[in-house]
Image: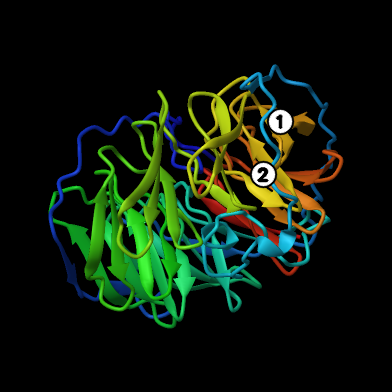
């Protein structure tokens, strides 16, 4: 159960309205290598830390009730009034899917998982910690990785929820781990860490020398380089093996959203309401778009477009090359969660309790449905099902062609963690301090 009330926290998956001031200084970066791993099988966590236990739920646990929520047509405005030129015909093959290594399933952040969906809505297992789980899980080779408010990066057996090891970062973890080539990369309020997945041993740690240790943006890994943003507004390109900074870009304000990568470009927004496209190799700015409110959602890149919503209540589709607005939709309330994209359709929720399916070429609403409270979580697609969490404490499974709710699974806390789907199981975290595996 929740032991404290939420006080305006959002970070992609729940972090909202923490006003983080100040421009980033362009200081250097020094990686360190201090082993701090706590292996659950042989060591006991310090008394001040939360002790997590893997709980396999009994078979008699009742199946969650599948509830079809009423659909709604929220107030919406298409801007500009002129009909934009349609984008070229959508080719699904343009999506580059890199399975099981990155936050939201790929470096393009499209939230598309090419795997069997979870269709029953029944609990497989639940792993309990004593701290809120904002972090979205990643599953690689049968191991699930996630972080919590206690500052621990956990590794669990994805089949039964058994803890394999935990690593103490020394600061709250809001970001989601990126796992590749035997290394888990994760940021916390104490810096950025590379941890060996086989043992939970620290490989290297990067702490900016501008005293802006908090790194709550989830990293993206491309061709041996890790790209991650900081609360100081600096985006770093780090050597994946050493943690040495190859280049850095000062965006001017806090960067809570996670970057997306496509076609040699890196895309992200910041708290000042500026959305950037950078050259991936050099960090040079290619274009920017400015609005009046922050971007907390991570962008999704597909079909030559960049999809992202902002706190200005507008959902945008930018031309990925030029930054031109291809279409935009003003749709009631703010967008915090990130969109999923599949087969020419964009799926996204907002703080109006609404969840939309939009035509990727035009922005036209194909269907809309409602949750019981705000949707801070990001969407994920597997097969014909789209998953999204809500502040009503539920994870929803929605038939993505019709918008019909197939089932919902209720937890004891807000669900802002992005779902991760593998082999018929959806994994997600909750503010009740647990990670769930639901079939």
Instruction: Give the x, y percent position of residue 16.
Output: 43, 32
Q: Nearer the viewer, residue 18 or 98?
A: 98
Q: With 23 as the anchor, is 183 left or right in this view? A: right
Instruction: State the SS at label 2.
Output: strand
The alpha-carbon separation of the residues under discs 1 and 2 comes to 10 Å
Residue at image x 24%, y 67%? 246
Q: Is residue 165 above or below residue 429?
A: below
Q: Nearer the viewer, residue 256 or 393?
A: 256
Q: With 407 as the anchor, is 143 left or right in this view? A: left
Q: Quadrant of residue 193?
A: bottom left
Q: Nearer the viewer, residue 86 or 96?
A: 86
Q: Quadrant of the N terminus?
A: top right
Q: With 301 as the anchor, is 10 left or right in this view? A: left
* Residue at image mark 1: 371
Q: Are marks 1 and 2 in contact (CB under 8 Å)?
A: yes
Q: How is the image coloured?
A: rainbow
* Residue at image mark 2: 388
Residue at image x 20%, y 34%? 22
Residue at image x 31%, y 73%? 37
Outermost residue, front side: 85
Q: Quadrant of residue 98?
A: bottom right
Which of the two labelled residues, at mark 1 and mark 2, occupies the earlier sequence position? 1
Instruction: Give the x, y percent position of residue 76.
Output: 68, 19
- Which labelled disc corresponds to residue 400? none
Residue 46 in view: no
Residues packed near mark 1 inside 10 Å, few (<14), some (14 to 19) or many (20 plus): many
Residue at image x 65%, y 18%? 81
Instruction: State the SS at label 1.
Output: loop
Instruction: Give the x, y percent position of residue 274.
Output: 38, 35
Q: Quadrant of the C terminus?
A: bottom right
Q: Is residue 337 above or below residue 47?
A: above
């Amino acid at each position: 159960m929740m032991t404290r009330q939420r006080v305006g926290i959002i970070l992609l998956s729940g972090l909202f309205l923490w006003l983080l001031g100040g421009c980033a200084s362009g200081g250097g970066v020094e990686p360190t290598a201090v082993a701090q791993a706590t292996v659950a099988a042989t060591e006991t966590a310090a008394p001040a830390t939360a002790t997590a236990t893997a709980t396999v739920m009994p078979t008699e646990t009742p199946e969650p009730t599948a509830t079809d929520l009423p659909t709604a047509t929220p107030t919406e405005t298409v801007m500009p009034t002129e009909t934009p030129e349609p984008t070229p015909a959508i080719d699904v093959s343009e999506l580059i899917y890199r399975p099981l290594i990155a936050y939201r399933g790929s470096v393009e952040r499209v939230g598309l998982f090419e795997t069997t969906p979870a269709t029953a809505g029944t609990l497989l297992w639940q792993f309990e910690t004593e701290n809120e789980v904002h972090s979205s899980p990643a599953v690689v080779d049968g191991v699930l990785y996630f972080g919590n408010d206690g500052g621990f990066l956990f590794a669990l057996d994805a089949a039964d929820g058994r803890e394999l090891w935990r690593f103490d970062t020394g600061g709250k973890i809001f970001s989601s781990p990126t796992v590749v080539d035997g290394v888990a990369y994760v940021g916390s309020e104490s810096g950025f860490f590379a941890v060996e997945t086989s043992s939970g041993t620290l490989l290297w740690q990067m702490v900016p020398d501008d005293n802006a240790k908090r790194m709550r943006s989830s990293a993206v890994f491309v061709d041996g380089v890790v790209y991650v943003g900081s609360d100081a507004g600096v985006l770093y390109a780090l050597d994946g093996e050493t943690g040495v900074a190859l280049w850095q870009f000062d965006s001017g304000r806090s960067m809570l959203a996670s970057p997306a990568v496509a076609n040699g470009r890196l895309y992200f927004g910041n708290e000042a309401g500026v959305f950037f496209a950078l050259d991936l190799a050099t960090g040079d700015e290619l274009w920017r778009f400015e609005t009046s409110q922050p971007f907390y959602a991570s962008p999704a890149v597909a079909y030559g477009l960049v999809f992202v919503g902002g706190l200005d209540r507008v959902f945008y589709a930018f031309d990925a090359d030029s930054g031109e607005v291809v279409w935009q939709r003003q749709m009631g309330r703010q967008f915090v969660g990130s969109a999923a994209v599949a087969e020419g359709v964009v799926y996204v929720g907002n703080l109006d309790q609404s969840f939309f399916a939009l035509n990727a070429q035009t922005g036209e609403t194909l269907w809309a449905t409602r949750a019981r409270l705000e949707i801070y979580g990001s969407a994920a697609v597997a097969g014909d099902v789209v998953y999204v969490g809500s502040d009503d404490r539920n994870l929803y499974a929605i038939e993505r062609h019709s918008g019909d709710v197939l089932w919902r699974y209720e937890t004891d806390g807000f669900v802002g963690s992005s779902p991760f789907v593998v082999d018929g199981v959806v994994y997600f975290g909750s503010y009740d301090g647990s990670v769930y595996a639901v079939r």
